Image (cartoon, grey):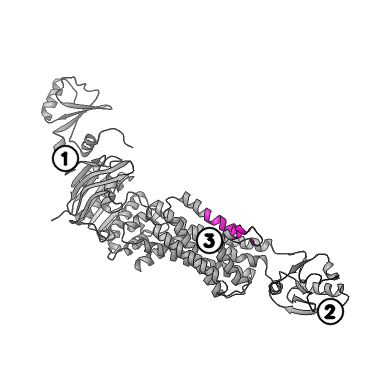
Amino acid sequence: MPPILEVKNLVKLYPRVKAVDGVSLSIREGICFGLLGPNGAGKTTTVEMMEGVIAPTAGEILYRGAPTSASFKLEVGIQFQSTVLQDFLTTREVLELFGSFYPKSLPLEELVEMCSLGEFLNRDNRKLSGGQKQRLFLALALVNDPKLLFLDEPTTGLDPQARQNFWRLIQSIKAKGKTIVLTTHYMEEAQVLCDEIAIMDHGRILELGAPAELLRKHFKGARLELPLTAFTPGSDFPWRFTRHPGRLDIETEVVNDTIQYLIQHNVSLSEMQVKNPTLEDLFLELTGRELRG
Amino acid sequence: MKIFFALFKARNREYLRDRGTLAWNFAFPLLVIFGFALGFSGAGRQIYKVGVVQSTGAAGEMAFLKTEYVQFIPVTDIKQALEKVRHHQFDMVLDLNGPKRYWVNETNPKGYVLERILWGSEGGVRYGKEVLTGREIRYIDWLLPGLLGMNMMFSCLFGVGYVIVRYRKGGILRRFKVTPIHAGQFITAQVASRWVLVLATTSILFVGTDLILDFVVYGSLLNLAFVFALGTLCMISLGLLIASRTQNEELAGGLLNLGTIPMMFLSEVWFSLEGSNPWLAKLAQILPLTHIVHAAREVMVEGAGLWDVMPDMVVLGAMTLVFTAMGAWLFRWE
């Protein structure tokens, strides 16, 4: 069975900038695929080429094994990072408007239930809160009951409650068998939602795979976190360590041996934390720690 | 058609629910119309106007022509002069060629006074009297077609041009682009919505102000509606052209002002360009508002039929086609 979406050697050139530089990936049906990368990595450009919003300079985009055609628009749903809707229209009217664009659309009641829109169905869309707006935008992306859903940083700017609520929504949509392509800045979000991820930088894919596999590939063992005041490792310290403001991180594959070493050196372990590496660690490892624009 | 009607309905709702803009669309022209009606009413002209048809020397020593506070204006086209008597623009026309005669409008009291002065100053010599009828054409009657045309112009250009640019800048067009709708469906719905709304607004304004100011409409209201309908379409298509690729509201505002300001002053909305520099009059001919105002004025004030204003209609039709074709060709969602 061919992947639902496949891109081969995708390139996007702008005057003086190579935004995307030979990206290839394939997305299996029914999974949530995350595209991660720092600002300016080329992830939004890549996704917009997949969506058909912008044309690639070179490369191929295949939907179910064939180049995308006019019917592609009928089978995908897109939630942009930021969208403005027509003024003075209520949630219901916006949904009806977008529903009319498709030959077949989901019943309004189903969308309302799926995205929890009931409490603001008759409210002017300009008067919705951030979380309510994102739910409405998600409902608009779902209005044609798409097979493939693109979500571009859907939880940016939401408070933790709204973000977690949104994650539950996405999980319930995924449970219906839809394929989701998600771009996000939040590593926790990718870890919670994505079955596979691609980490991009400078227009290229740096890593591609399941989050757990990638973590296993790049990190062995665990990370011990100690306050900087508790311990100053010498040059003969046998494990890799990194100093952070007020904190010392030790990476070790043999947690017991490391703890034994610290006890022998009279290091207080009362504030020590043992952590498994996260996607954020992997992200920073691959893309560096310098500030991006 | 489902998509067209959905977009049409959405745009209408947006317009009708925007109370501020809606109120301004009525308030602005009403303020101007009533302001001018008030400003130019009252005592009116302090002098009498008499059109005099005469070949050189025909007047001789006629005492009447020396009357103070009467302006004697030589005329060559008697037909045109008589129209002016009908519209109270002349209070009398005096023909001194051949058997002397004069025309007055029986509904114009100034004609009656002038007639008495003529009899008195010519020692009881009676001239042939011809009586005309016709309502006075006040300045506001002359001005109204221009004001309605100007209001249509603003409503069309800003209501379509500015709104599409706002949609583009806000990402609404981008959101539409990823749905199955075509640019043509979107554009047609915008045009249809604005066309219906502007014609409805103009009709309400016309009827509302007519009830109070009782305008002169010599021509057919259907012909007037046709002129405004085509004129509205032409202005909307110009708005589309301006908005076809413009990315931000600031540039759109500048371009729209570049279009509207010359039309406001050169399209004979406020004053006639008769006697002005010929190149100015020629420049005015390339402005669509000139043709809308001229045709509407001809119908309302002169009682012209559609055939009489056909040159204006042809120009407006051609402009509409060119603007629409260019606007559709240049249109970009983003």
Q: Secondary structure at mark 2?
A: loop
Q: Nearer the viewer, mark 1 or mark 2?
A: 2
Mark 2 crowdedness (10 Å alpha carbons): few <14, some 14-19, many ≥20: few
- The answer for which chain carries disc 1 is A
Do the residues under discs 1 and 2 have CB atoms within 8 angstroms? no
* Residue bearing the label numbered 1: A214
Residue type beneath disc 2: Arg
Q: Calculate the distance from the C-alpha at mark 3 to the C-alpha at mark 2.
A: 53 Å
Magenta stretch: give its range: B257-281
Q: Residue furthest front?
A: B56
Tell me which residue sits at (64%, 66%) in the image.
Answer: B142
Nearer-the-camera pick, B88 or A168: B88
Disc 3 is attached to a residue of which chain?
B
Numbered-mark total: 3
Look at mark 3 in the image and give the residue it sits on. B153
Q: Is A233 within the magenta?
A: no
Marked residue nearer the N-terminal end (3 or 2): 2
Quadrant of image for the N terminus of chain A: bottom left
Location of residue A241 with respect to B185 vertically, above or below:
above
As drawn, is B88 to the left or to the right of A211?
right
Q: Dot 3 surroundings within 10 Å: few (below 14), some, or many (20 or more)?
A: many
In the displayed structure, does residue A242 sit left or right of residue B212? left
Give a yes or no on whether discs 1 and 3 share a subunit.
no
Q: Is residue B233 visible?
A: no
Q: Secondary structure at mark 3?
A: helix
